[in-house]
Image (cartoon, rainbow, N blue to C red):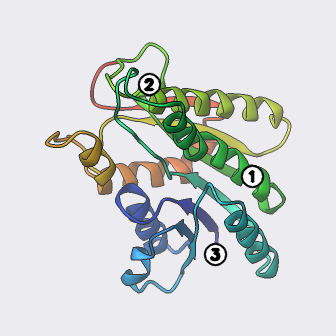
């Protein structure tokens, strides 16, 4: 049974990803502050309470992987933070909070898990169309979009540094998905894509995408840039 680690499984895309991988006979290590995923009662989901900005939680995860001799086939960095404030309203502290989740927490997680990746593991970073150079940008998302842009560059550099291995690193730049995070940031906005639909796409890309893609930053959106 292959193993996937997914962050941000408390709701939305991450929750649906954990369910889909589990139903397709993968061992799922679910990482989030919320344990909602446990309520599904699926035997092959192992949930760990996890805050991606907390060093102690990272250490606990490493110890869990050591104790259980975990070999990671897929890592999906899905957890994210969005604060909708115009540039004159947003603070440097807001920027730091967003970057801690959307970039530095992911850097920390990848570094901590490196010794547990299988020889041909696939690391998928969930980014945003707003972080894609040349795409339409949205008012109030200076911190969020720039953090996702940095994540995209990280993806490309990691693929270059490890190109002589069989590891794959890819970034999926999602358009609007009807998640709680979107609803909180943009009340009343209705996205065309549901969390389940997007999770199904990410599942298929995770399993099959590494055959054709490495170091790629890929827009996943119905709208034009």
Asked whether the residues under the numbered discs 3 and 1 touch, taking CB atoms below 8 Å apart as contact, a structural biologist would say no
Residue 44 falls left or right of residue 154: left
Task: State which tag comes first along the sequence, 3 or 1.
Answer: 3
Q: How far apart are marks 2 and 1 (CA)?
A: 35 Å
Residue shown at the point (32%, 23%) measured from the top left? 138
Q: Which quadrant of the figure contains the N terminus? A: bottom right
Q: Distance between the residues labelled 2 and 3?
A: 41 Å
Residue 77 falls left or right of residue 163: left
Task: State which tag comes first along the sequence, 2 or 1.
Answer: 1
Residue shown at the point (16%, 41%) measured from the top left? 190
- Residue 85: x and y in percent read 35, 31
Task: State which tag comes first along the sequence, 2 or 3.
Answer: 3
Residue 117 falls left or right of residue 53: right
Residue shown at the point (44%, 81%) measured from the top left? 38
Residue positioned most to the top: 134
- Vertically, is 165 above or below 27? above
Label 1 Cα neighbours within 10 Å, binned few <14 / some 14-19 / many ≥20 = some
Q: What element carries label 1?
A: strand
- Vertically, is 90 above or below 17? above
Residue shown at the point (49%, 16%) measured from the top left? 133
Q: Distance between the residues labelled 3 and 1?
A: 15 Å
Q: Mark 3 points at which residue?
A: 1
Q: Name the residue under label 1.
A: 120
Residue 48 falls left or right of residue 157: left
Q: Which of 90 and 147 is in front in this view?
A: 90
Q: Name the residue under label 2.
A: 142
Q: What element carries label 2?
A: helix
- Residue 223: x and y in percent read 27, 25
Between label 2 and label 1, give the one nearer the viewer.
2
């Amino acid at each position: 049974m292959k193993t996937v680690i997914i962050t941000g499984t408390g709701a939305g895309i991450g929750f649906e990803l954990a369910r889909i991988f589990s139903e397709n006979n993968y061992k799922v290590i679910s990482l989030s502050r919320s344990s909602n995923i446990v309520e599904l009662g699926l035997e092959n989901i192992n949930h760990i309470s996890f805050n991606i900005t907390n060093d102690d939680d990272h250490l606990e995860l490493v110890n869990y992987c050591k104790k259980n001799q975990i070999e990671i086939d897929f890592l999906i960095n899905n957890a994210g933070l969005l604060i909708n404030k115009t540039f004159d309203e947003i603070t440097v502290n807001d920027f730091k909070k967003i970057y801690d989740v959307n970039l530095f927490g992911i850097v920390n997680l990848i570094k901590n898990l490196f010794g547990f990746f299988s020889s041909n593991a696939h690391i998928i970073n969930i980014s945003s169309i707003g972080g894609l150079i040349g795409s339409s940008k949205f008012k109030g998302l200076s911190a969020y979009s720039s953090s996702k842009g940095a994540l995209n560059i990280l993806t490309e550099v990691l693929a270059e540094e490890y190109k002589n291995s069989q590891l794959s690193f890819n970034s999926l730049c999602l358009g609007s998905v009807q998640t709680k995070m979107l609803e909180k940031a943009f009340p009343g906005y209705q996205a065309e894509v549901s969390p389940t639909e997007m999770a199904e796409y990410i599942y298929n890309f995770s399993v099959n995408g590494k055959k054709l893609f490495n170091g790629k930053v890929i827009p996943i959106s119905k709208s034009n840039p």
